[in-house]
Image (cartoon, rainbow, N blue to C red):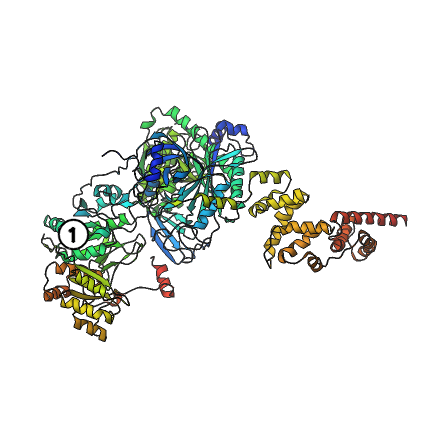
Amino acid sequence: MAEDYFQGYKNKALEVLKKFNVRVWGNCVVETSRGKFTGTVLPRAENDDDKHIVLKIDTGYNVGIAVDTILSMKETSYKKANYKIPEKEFPYTQGLPKVKLIGTGGTIASRLDYRTGAVIPAFSPGELYGAVPELAEVCNLTTEKVFAVFSENMGPEQYKQLAVAIGKEIENGVQGIVIGHGTDTLHHTAAALTFMIQNPPVPIVLVGSQRSSDRPSSDAAMNLIHACYTAGHSDIAEVMVCMFGPTSDEYGLLHRGTRVRKMHSSYRSTFRTIGDTPLARVTRNGITPIKKEYNHRRVDNKVTILPYFDEKVAIVYYYPNMQPDIIDSLVDNGYKGIVIAGTGLGHVNIPLYPALRRACEKGVAVYMTVQTLWGYVHMFVYETGRELMALGVVPAENMLPEVAYIKLGWVLGQTQDPEEVKRLMLTPINDDITRREPYNGYLIYQGGLPEVEEFIKKFRK
Amino acid sequence: MKTQPDPRRNYRQTLEDIGYVTLKEARQADYDRIGFMSGLEVHQQLKTREKLFCRCPAARYQKDDEYDAEVIRHMRPTLSELGEYDGTALMEFKTRKEIIYRIKNETTCTYEVDDTPPFPLNREALDIAIEISLLKKLNIVGEVHITRKQYLDGSIPTGFQRTAIIGVEGEIELPHKKIRLIQLSIEEDSCREISDVGHTRVYKTDRLGMPLIETVTYPDMVNPQEVAQACQFIRFLNRSTGKVLTGMGAARQDVNVSCRGGTRVEIKGVSKISYIPELTHNECYRQWALLNIKDILLKRIKKPDLWQVSSKSLEPDSLDLKPRFAKQIRENGWQIYGVSLPKFQGILSHFTQPGQVFANEISDRLKVIACIEKPNMDHSESLKPVLGAAQWSVVRKQLGARHDDALLICWGPEEDMPTAMETIEERCRMALEGVPNETRKALTDGTTLFERVLPGADRMYPDTDSAPIPLKNEDIEILRQRIPAVTIGAWKQMQQWGIPEDTYEYILKNNLFPLLKTLVEDLKEKPVFAGTLLGHKLKHVEGQVTPSAEFRYEQIADLVKMIRAKKLEMGIIDRLLPLVYQHPKMDFESLLISMRYKPVSREEIQEDIPFLIQKFAAIKNKNGKEALTRWLMGQLRGKALGNLSMKELRTLTDDAIKQENKRKKTT
């Protein structure tokens, strides 16, 4: 392919560049009706308009020049920038555990893209070591990029691929797995892997970052160090999410893959265990367990990989005045499973009943969860709940809606038999349903209360 | 054994060698000789309701110990756009600082602590920045691109400052020359530092995110006074819009200085313009001194590339330390390292700044880079030595150093020693090259100390969280209408008229120059009277009185016309101005009534005087003509106001006193 001299420029802006014979990366002098500008032409983000040309001026700043003010342009020199990021080979240290880092894309491994102006997944794991040399003190790391997709584009195919890849690594005797992943759907993947990789002998740690690694304040390095430490040294052989505990650079938390959820759009400490306590606290020097019961690390290489998923499953987030045609259209489109995130203890309005009855009669598996996230579905308490159960809607206890969605897809990937589906759904794999809810499983402190403020001030956020 | 040089004598000698003169003594010829060159980066906070990238209230400040929560962060260097680590970035990372932010809910949201992306740029701030850019004749960009400028000292929790260019290539006009401007940018202000001890630095986040503009000049200034003058004028232009904050910390400047053969060094955070001359003067000579050091060293050291220090951990007991120092070392578990600097004899005590020598350059860096608090070292040419001559002999022997090597000991925590040794070697190597690139902190005594390595343009990269903002011609034209008539023309005219300078700011800020012109040119009032009427009297009234309805400045011209029309004496305006300001809708007659004005003739006033002189003799025990005159003026002032000028009144009283005296003599 011929070299693109006008990266990202289109229409009017492109015409002007061509007219004056100026290329991207060309140093030029621009005369405009607003005065003279000097600098290097930068690529234009593809979604930006066609009315401006971007210049990097000598002081390092970028400015945009309106095309319709340009009187003349003259290229004075040309130097193409080279975005090579130093890549170092990961050093081997005798005695440290062997950890595999699997890359999937997302912000833990990313750099800036000048065409779109966005952060893109392009940091190879080797480059990643170049940026976080501390990793060498924690484990012997090997890396593999299974695929590169944004977190929001992760789906069943990727879950299955990941599960199979991890199964192979375990059989090959790896001592811990780290999966770099975008944060948006990190908890969906964590749930999927919990169901697909059963009884693993080693820790499987999902990690991401809320501030991309191109920022000095990024949480990526610390999360990665914590995750690698956990994978290599922890006794907890489960699928876990490892992310910041507080917003401060203090410690990470290990969350069980089936009870974790992203709870803030931008905070570092966005991942929280819902309805239970986290598994453990982690720093680069050690792991402090919080939960007493967990699956312990083993020395064997045995693991059960169950890479199944039926994609015809949906979550329906109930709202007042929801119309029955929403349910009908799912059924008519061949959906085999519906997870409802109901109000309160697990309710929907009466107009939906006929549609739900029809769905159940057609063999669609309908499961009820709660949109309050915390607490159990209790469908015996009110008449509504009892009626819904009579229609065939199955309460999914305290399974989180997203977890129930993933699990139902996984179960339907294995069987269509309603009884078997129900048995699998209601048999917890790893705390996707817990038998009891501890008193400290629900803690959302309200700011402003003197005792809360005192706590915040004393123990940094 | 050969003797070591006397450090004090060496300091004085080297000061003379480089031809240092004080700021007072220095002439332009001195600055021309050493090639003084300086440019400015003037920061100015804008007066907006909210911060630049979030909706926190602007300009609310908290005390150091007033906070709701703390957040801890660390800064890591990142790869720049061109795939390289920036020099500053690496240095800051070496320091391994733990940064603590003290946040108060009232002034800080999740944006400031980098827990949420930026909200769209504050348009109010952008408009002010454009307005000021127009005032400085800058070329306004077509599209504003938010850029990230890395700061790894922790002063901004994201690790970068969001900043954007509004205009490039402008100029300001000083009375005798033009100063070219490189650019004007809008940016978010940084945190305020509370403390920085060892590996912990504490900041508060109240000021963080305040909208700020930075005006950058070319290095067009050729002497310290010119730098101060340019700074004054830039500050004045900023203020003339009335849309910027004033007061402590609202305007700050960084000053770039170099000498011929030197390097651009940035003096950060100069809070007062009056500090600029001393600081720039000293910095230029510091560089001149460092170049002298380079010359001396290169004569002695033939192969600079091969030059290296040798260092060794020293046993404290072997040094026969003073008991208090020995105890300090022992109790803190510190280590002492000895370092020999080959062929550096006479360099450590070489003059650099008033009261400072080359060794201070090393000590400053040990504090900043290796995080070892001062005092952190002693050396063989110290003006205030910790070790005696005999002890230095021991060190010299232990290090196997030659007599022309300079010696240094450094103490501190064991884990900081490797960085300390690197730092010492690095700074000494730089001495062979001349003046290091650095930013320096301004001290009130006019000297500076090392702050950090000067960052380059490669620490800038686009902010992926913000979209570019197009600036349309029509929007800019609307803003152009708003800019005050603050031309150098107005400034020069007022100077020519002899109007006191302390009135200019108020007059220009409030766009009163046209009114001033009307008063002087159309109404033929004396310029000094008109200037102080606006710049002093009106300003005072505005600060004291609240108007009951909208007061228009043009009413002042009407007032002058009315006084003229009524053939009143102009001095009455002192009493009328506050009244008009308070009651803009009151008619002129009512104003006169409310101030109890009565028309009185010259003769009537004159008639009162002899009686008053008698009365003064009766009630006052003070004698003398001055006391009498003052008292008489006081008694008659109210009556005379609007009828007689104070000057005329004085003539009347003087005459009356003379006559009275004559009368006394004859009787």
| In-image side of A422 versus B84 (left or right) | left
- Where on the picture, by quarter, is residue A388? bottom left
Q: Position of residue A178 (x, y in %)?
A: 19, 50
What secondary structure is found at the residue carrying circle 1?
A: helix
- Where on the picture, by quarter, is residue B319? top left
Q: Position of residue A312 (x, y in %)?
A: 16, 58
Q: Could you tell me which quadrant the N terminus of chain B lies in?
A: top left
Q: Which residue is mark 1?
A: A157
Give the camera-side residue of B177 and B168: B168
Give the camera-side residue of B541 and A32: A32
Disc 1 sits on a residue from what chain? A
| In-image side of A427 versus B381 (left or right) | left
Q: Position of residue A384 (x, y in %)?
A: 23, 73
Q: Give, as a three-letter code, the residue at label 1.
A: Glu
Residue A419 showing in the rendered view? yes
Q: Residue at x 65, y 57 (%)?
A: B579
